[in-house]
Amino acid sequence: MIQNRILNVSGMKCGGCEANVIGKLSPIKGVISVTAEFKADKVTLEFDDKLTDLDSLTKVITIAGFTVI
């Protein structure tokens, strides 16, 4: 099933941080779309939960150096 989630993510300080998060999440199988907004501390995800899960996606964000609140 397609899931839409908005995550509060701290540590993004600029457009480069946004690009980093988008670049890490976009290639993951099952991710349909991802946007990041550093000014709002927000990452918006659309993904197929048959191919990936929210825990795996939040782990990728954490490994990239950001904190999912």
Image (tube, grey):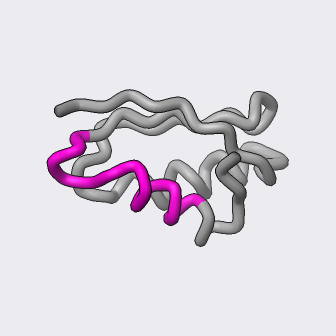
Q: Nearer the viewer, residue 57 or 24?
A: 57
The magenta stretch spans residue 52: yes
* Percent x, y of residue 4: 38, 28
* Percent x, y of residue 60: 50, 64
The magenta stretch spans residue 55: yes
Residue under the point 71% across and 56% down: 67
In this picture, residue 40 sits left or right of residue 21 = right
In this picture, residue 11 sits left or right of residue 59 = right
**Quarter-wise, where is residue 66 in the image?**
bottom right
Report how many numbered discs are placed on residues in the image: 0
**Quarter-wise, where is residue 64 in the image?**
bottom right
* Percent x, y of residue 9: 69, 45
In the rendered image, the residue lying farthest to the bottom is 63
Q: Nearer the viewer, residue 60 or 16?
A: 60
Q: Nearer the viewer, residue 11 or 35?
A: 11
Residue under the point 58% across and 53% down: 21
Position of the N terminus by quadrant: top left
Residue under the point 66% across and 34% down: 42
In this picture, residue 51 sits left or right of residue 9 = left
Residue under the point 44% across and 36% down: 45
Read off the magenta span.
Answer: 48-61
In this picture, residue 56 sits left or right of residue 21 = left
